Image: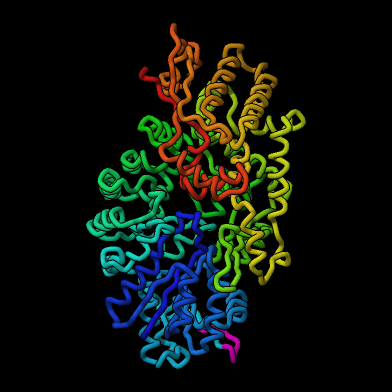
Amino acid sequence: MNIYFGDLAYLSKNNYTTPLPLNAGYITSYLLKSLPVKVKIFKDPNKLLDTINEKCPDVLALTCYNWNANLNFAIAKKCKKDNPNLVVIMGGPAFVTEDKEWKEQFFLTNPFIDLFIVREGEYSFLKCIELLLENNLNLGKSDRSKWPNTFYGFDHKEKKIIHNPMLPVERLELSTVPSPFLNGLLDEFLHDERLAPIIETNRGCPYNCSFCVWGQATLTKLRKFDLNTVVDEIHYISKETKNPTKVMFVADANFGILKRDSEIADAFMECKEKYDFPKRLFVYSLKNQTIHSINTYEKIKSIANMSMSYQSTNEKTLEEIGRKNIPIQNYETNRALCEQKGIKTYCEMIYGLPDETFDTFTNGISEVLQAGQERIQLYAHSINLGAETATKEYMKKFGFETRFRYQPEYAGTHHGISTTEYEEVVVKTNTMSLDDFLKIRDIHFFVLLLGSSVFKEFQRMLKCSEFNIALISKLLLSEEKLWPTSLKEIMKGFRKACKDELLTKEDIKKEINENDVKRLKTKEMMLVPAAICKLFAKRTNIVDFFDCLSETIKRNLNKNHSEETLKDIILSLSFSCDRAVYYDGLDNNKKLEYSYDIDAWLKSEKPVGLSKYKTSKNIIYDFKLDDGLEEAFVKAKAAATTLEESVYLLKFKFFPLSDDRIFSYTRYRSKI
């Protein structure tokens, strides 16, 4: 039997952060251990189509996620039309198992799909291939009582779902899966510079948040890959990868949850020292931090940040989404410990969840900020097929109204087949209006901007006041008439983009062409970061914004704070302004003098005013860009048509996972 296995993606020459096909690697390794079949793995849709044109396989297997579903459907449809005997198998979390009507419509809309497999793929795909071998490549002739409960098919004559709930699939023992790295199965993809390595050290998630499919897809219980194998994989990957950004992904749901994760952290740092890889690690942190997880992240703090996510602080919301946060006092203690250890942290929060209002959400931001967190990532509530929030019952109960957004990052034309992907987001609930949603988008912009590391001096001094960046954001929005022209123009474009991107189901094109793809490619995907990139593109934008912010503070904080505190807040803002990078005048040899020991002030045990750190003599400081940023910006400019676009490409393509480091200089005390 000949099998082509695609974990397809929209690849481009300017994107180096697409993960390699680890999922297909695991499933293929497990399959080849048991059956003498031929399997070829694909990431590039063009390569898959070329190979099928040369020789059609017996089976085409495709992994199906929100970011490649339409690409899969279009390619599978074309291949099945050209090769009617081809067996098409899809699998992944993007399948609503509890909705009979949805499942029927899925197979009626996509009649070229012979079988869809849910949950873990290794064992179920093996059983699928065994049944095909036993029945001469005809699943229709197979004994349905042998179908695992992870199989979903469709009888087009009877117009009904084929499913056997009586044969449950147990959780996979991960030690039975041969490493697709160590057996060389993924070498081709490690050597493709467009692809970033990804590794899984454990599988499963003990949490069961209603908006997420992670726990449902892996049956919640946490299981471990062999530690020695994991360490060997990290070394093998670090030695073999050709990815120029030196980025690596960790596919664990809660890295840091296990005691052995400390040893895995050691392996990452050993490889960084030995192979200069990884230089940047993207990990999902343990939801509720422990001393052990904090100590683990201390080891990798030079290459990874630690998320301290809350999603919401509203108790009613947390109850409805099945989540329990640690008390805010514990959160504050943990965050302070991380700061003491030099670990950069951030919090993630989601707007559009059940029972959340504009006030509860924005008050929640303030609560997290008051707990000392300086960086908060905000996300619209995205509907993930397979999650509880995607069911009709759940959406009706909480009055969810959704819209769709094109994903320009996920658009392309492959041998005449043009596709793009969509994201479905909640824009209205029983407790949040569409107007509230758009107002939160404004808050989102200013909170992400003021929470960036550019403003760390300003953030520090604000802790000596009754204000935080959420309240400052609201003040800025209340005085919109006083904004400088440059800020008004950036916000005008941002607000228009936020409205224009929201599409109804009827607005979505069922079929697109190559010209549509080209138009989509000109659109920005991440609207809030894109607007921030526009701000930092030019010096005049930065100066205008800092002046505006200073005046807003003077008008609104003078009644509640002493003249000295107000003066220190404005001074701290000037320190932040000096570190801001503007891309129409990069200067990696910048020097400034201050009559304050800023480093000592920032490291003080508790936030205090600047007066205690005034010096008798000026201190000279050097300002430096991150290593490699200038070279990456040269590449970004070559790929862009405008300065603003080049900053956007720098952040997301040429200097990936850089957070907000591209927007600020690092300040060092001069050795001269």
> Which SS type dominates the magenta stretch?
loop
> Could you tell me how many numbered marks the image carries?
0
Residue 429 located left or right of residue 53 = right
Q: Position of residue 608 (x, y in %)?
A: 48, 18
Displayed quadrant of residue 491: top right
**Which is nearer the eye, 203 or 395?**
203
Displayed quadrant of residue 178: bottom left
Find the residue positioned furthest to the top.
616
Q: At 42% from the left edge and 59% from the top edge, which residue is drawn? A: 195
Residue 153 located left or right of residue 506 = left
Locate the C terminus and report the quarter of the image it occupies. Answer: top left
**Which is nearer the eye, 371 or 88?**
88
Res 506 seen here: yes
Q: Position of residue 589 (x, y in %)?
A: 45, 26
Residue 656 located left or right of residue 297 = right
Q: Position of residue 75 (x, y in %)?
A: 54, 75
Q: At 67% from the left edge and 58% from the top edge, which residue is drawn? A: 400
Specify the color scheme: rainbow
Find the residue positioned furthest to the right.
481
Q: At 36% from the left edge and 39% from the top edge, which residue is drawn? A: 301
Q: At 50% from the left edge and 62% from the top edge, which residue is drawn? A: 11
Find the residue positioned furthest to the left.
228
Q: Is residue 549 above or below residue 140?
A: above
Q: Is residue 298 above or below residue 82?
A: above
Displayed quadrant of residue 505: bottom right
- Residue 157 in magenta? yes
**Which is nearer the eye, 56 or 659?**
56
- Residue 62 in magenta? no
Res 371 seen here: no
Magenta residues span 156-163
Q: Position of residue 81 (x, y in %)?
A: 56, 85
